[in-house]
């Protein structure tokens, strides 16, 4: 029995899976180390899709952290993350699939998130970062303040960049 | 329940010791969570683990949990992110729009 509503990502067992959280530790993703390579991948994603923000997110139970980012400002930059119940990226931990929101203001799951209603996110596309051991770590995502569609070519580009991000992350794995 | 103001704009309550212990419990189970919490409270010089702890005390305990490594580090880092989110939003509310802060009921 979970204390969370069905549309709260924390209701998914994978969110609290000890093996997934151990994997995040083994890959050095729980220590908030800055990684210029992951920042560069985020910057490329944002630039090539013409959007202001991109993140390499890490979903750690009750919060979303960042392994890389581009374009963040305000409290999300200062906090280096956000509560997971506001997170778009967390939905891919449950589904293991890309998550695309063309208009967050009318989206059935995300429309009431404060990052939509207060902070103004309108569009989102994220590709899950799946480790070599099969765990969803987080997403490579792009974010914008205007309603937008994402074409097949753009999603393929995001997949390619997500694969590069996973390859970089795997280089950080603790031996053993 | 926290005695601190919640952030009205984001409907975000201040993280509590109960929230942090529940997060630990979901990952390592109740028995180990209580043991880890008590140990970390001791290391952080929070002499008696208790429900009403300040944000600073919870943060200090979470930092001790980060040092445990493994899945516990991931859980503890998430607690710290929630604390930072609260602190940043509260600071922003104080600086720009005091009327958006209300006392949690």
Image (cartoon, rainbow, N blue to C red):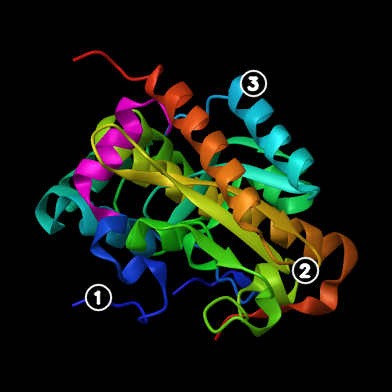
Q: Nearer the viewer, mark 3 or mark 1?
A: 3
- Kind of element beneath mark 1: loop
Give the Cα distance between marks 2 and 1. 30 Å
Circle 2 packing at 10 Å, graded few (<14), some (14-19), many (20+), is some
Horizontal side, residue A106 vs residue A30: left or right: right
The residue indicated by pointer 1 is: A2
Residue A61 in percent (x, y) is at 36, 54
First-in-chain label (3 vs 1): 1
The answer to whether mark 2 and mark 1 are in CB contact below 8 A is no
Task: Check the image and name the residue furthest to the top.
Answer: A175
Camera-side residue of A126 and B69: A126
Is residue A17 within the magenta segment? yes
Q: Nearer the viewer, mark 2 or mark 1?
A: 2
Give the Cα distance between marks 3 and 1. 38 Å
Q: Residue at x 64, y 21 (%)?
A: A36
First-in-chain label (3 vs 2): 3
The vertical placement of A150 against A108, above or below, is above
Horizontal side, residue A33 vs residue A95: left or right: right
For the N terminus of chain A, the image quarter is bottom left
Magenta segment, prevailing SS (helix, strand or loop): helix
The residue indicated by pointer 3 is: A36
Q: Which residues are magenta?
A: A16-29
First-in-chain label (2 vs 1): 1
Residue A105 in percent (x, y) is at 70, 80
Give the Cα distance between marks 3 and 2. 27 Å
Residue A135 in percent (x, y) is at 28, 43
């Amino acid at each position: 029995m979970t204390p969370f509503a069905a549309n709260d990502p924390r209701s998914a067992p994978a969110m609290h899976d000890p093996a997934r959280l151990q994997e995040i530790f083994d890959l050095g993703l729980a220590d908030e180390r800055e990684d210029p390579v992951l920042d560069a991948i985020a910057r490329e994603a944002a630039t090539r899709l013409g959007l202001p923000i991109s993140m390499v997110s890490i979903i750690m139970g009750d919060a979303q952290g960042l392994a890389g980012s581009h374009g963040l400002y305000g409290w999300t930059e200062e906090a280096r993350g956000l509560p997971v119940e506001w997170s778009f990226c967390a939905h891919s931990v449950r589904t293991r699939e890309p998550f695309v929101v063309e208009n967050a203001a009318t989206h059935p799951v995300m429309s009431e998130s404060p990052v939509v209603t207060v902070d103004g996110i309108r569009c989102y596309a994220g590709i899950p970062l799946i480790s070599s051991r099969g765990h969803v770590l987080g997403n490579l995502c792009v974010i914008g303040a205007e309603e937008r569609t994402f074409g097949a070519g753009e999603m393929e580009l995001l997949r390619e960049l997500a694969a590069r991000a996973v390859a970089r992350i795997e280089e950080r794995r603790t031996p053993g | 329940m926290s005695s601190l103001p919640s952030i009205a704009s984001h409907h975000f309550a201040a993280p509590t010791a109960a929230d942090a212990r529940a997060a630990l419990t979901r990952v390592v189970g109740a028995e180990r969570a209580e043991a880890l919490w008590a140990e970390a409270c001791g290391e952080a010089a929070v002499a008696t683990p208790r429900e009403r702890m300040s944000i600073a005390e919870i943060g200090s305990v979470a930092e001790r949990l980060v040092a445990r490594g493994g899945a516990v580090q991931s859980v503890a880092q998430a607690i710290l992110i929630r604390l930072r989110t609260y602190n940043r939003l509260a600071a922003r509310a104080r600086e720009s729009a005091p009327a958006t802060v209300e006392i949690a009921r």
